[in-house]
Amino acid sequence: LDDLTYHHHEGENFYKKYEMKSLLEREKVVEVPKTIETHTIDSIGQLKEIPTLMIPVASDEAFLEQTLYGFMFCENESAYYLPLQEASNDEAFIQWLKSVKLTTYRAKNAMHLFDRYGFTIPHIQDDLHLAGFLLYSQATNMDDLFEALEIPLHEPWKDLSKKSLGGFSEERMKQEIASIIVPLAHKKSSILASIEEENMKELYYGVELPLSKILYSMENEGIDVDENKLEEIRQDYQQKMDALLETIYSFAGHEFNVDSPKQLAVVLFDELKLKTGKKRSTAADILEKLKEDHPIIDQILEYKKYSKIMSTYIIGLKKYIHNGKIFTTFNQTVTATGRLSSSDPNLQNISIKDEEGKEIRKAFVAPKGYKLISADYSQIELRMLAHMANEYNMIDAFKHDIDIHTKTASELFDVSPDEVDEHERRIAKTVNFGIIYGQTEFGLSQTLHISRQEAKKFMRTYFASYPNIHRFMDQTIEFCEENGYVETMLHRRRAIPEIHDKNFMTKEFGKRAAMNAPIQGSAADLIKIAMIKTYEAINSLGYDTKMLLQIHDELIFVAPDHEVEEIIALVQKTMDEAMQLNVPLKAGISYGQNWYEAK
């Protein structure tokens, strides 16, 4: 549900969307002029008071590509701009960085800029981007967040990247940051007061802020990539694609562009006369349904799979390699549930579902004398559900290390656990995960290709076996209907305005999101806590091991050979004890020369 962004009718009331708690009630409303007066200074000594709020002025690109222009400060109703050249020579600024407790906007971004341009990284006390996002988790991009914070921008943030409008020029970025910094200076205290009122102090100061420093160091580290291996995979896949095309052309009786939906539709629906829906769609899910009708479909699906891997990972990753490494960016403010996402390149969607996608992991390697260590939590969301619902039957299974899908299958099919077969376990697994995602009877019947009656029976049996889960789901929906939001164990909120929608389908979506967000969000909070604790444990003991990546529930480290055993023991202990729950936490850890072997 993380990625199901729900689009409202444009006219919908914005406030409803962000469940606005007007931050301005406590403050006198500052009327912000469209263009804020900006003065250029050549030393921060020219400011009357020693500043604590500062925002870098830079192009908004991936951190390795960013250009830093200077630094923006605020005094009274004006913005003050210290250009890069002047900053580098300003003794007052250089000393200030060493002692300031800085408030900024997008701390991680600022750390990269300080580092790349040779400045001391100051102590960062507050990041108003992280704080604002925690208050308005629906606002997953800059424009939405500034709108939620009631800060009018000089121009829409998303337009800044448009080359046709001038791209990230110093002038445009200066005006943009000036338009942000003055209202932020006024709103800082009310933003932080709201964090406290909503019980998010621990989440903000204990998790998100410290995590941004760790993510900064992970991004800086990067991960080694074996370009020869990538090329080897590319050639192998290219041959497979060529062979598939031959077969596809022979079925069609002529060559055509398989990648063109239009040409593909002509071949399938006009020439081969396969039955078509209203839309003549050639989307993968539609093709899946035509599998039985013609052998060409299998070949096309296979071709599309390779083609996607090729464009996304093989060609796609190539352009991100700098000096033999890939440096991804981790985003803390992109998913409403609180999971991290990764971009430029996105490493979180490297498929583990099929062998072909997994193959790509062989190109992510440890240097000579080092190993990659992969640690991931087993069934973290089901454990979270068992704990939050206080479901004794499930807690008991986890405590005795009984396979939870087998346990559920034995309940669903009324057989003893050792009589459960693969097929029954697979159904139980689908039902277990379906429950986490708030799946309906209809959804379950679709997924399992069974009748709604059967799906209903499965769900009834499930809730009878795990009565507290049923109660928990009902209470969560009730809470959501009353408050318009749900929250995780650490009080991370997700506003769900859909829960009050008049449209039945929209309301149902809201219910599913309400059931899923506390579980997925609490699991995300746990992973973040585990990252902080393992990072601190490794560093405080002086190891040379580095944390490199976080991919969903998996953490990846690079360790010198002689540290591998000790690190595995340390990570195991730290992850298993990261949070005290009613269920045991269990991390599975393995290592290897590359990511494929380490998984």
Image (spheres, grey):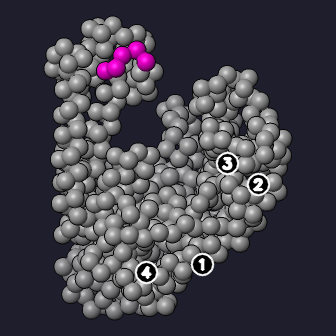
The tag earlier along the polypeptide, 3 or 1, is 3
Residue 421: quarter of image: top right
- Residue 373's place in the image compared with 49, above or below, is above
Residue 81: quarter of image: bottom left
Q: 465 or 10: nearer the eye?
A: 465
Position in image of residue 466 (x %, y %): 80, 47
Pointers 1 and 4 in contact (C-beta within 8 Å): no
Badge 2 amino acid: Met
Badge 3 amino acid: His
Look at discs 1 and 4 and give the one toward the viewer: 4
The tag earlier along the polypeptide, 2 or 4, is 2
Q: CA distance from mark 3 to mark 4?
A: 32 Å
Q: CA distance from mark 3 to mark 2?
A: 10 Å
Q: CA distance from mark 1 to mark 4?
A: 14 Å
Residue at image point 19% right, 61% down? 227
Name the residue tied to disc 2: 394
Q: CA distance from mark 2 to mark 1?
A: 23 Å
Q: 204 or 398: nearer the eye?
A: 398
Name the residue tied to disc 3: 405
Badge 4 amino acid: Val
As helix, strand or loop, the secondary structure at mark 4 comes to: helix
Q: What type of secondary structure mainly makes up the magenta span? A: helix
Q: Which residues are magenta?
A: 292-296
As helix, strand or loop, the secondary structure at mark 1 comes to: helix
Q: 367 or 85: nearer the eye?
A: 367
The tag earlier along the polypeptide, 3 or 4, is 3
The answer to whether residue 435 of the structure is visible from this angle is no
Position in image of residue 358 (x %, y %): 37, 52
Name the residue tied to disc 1: 573
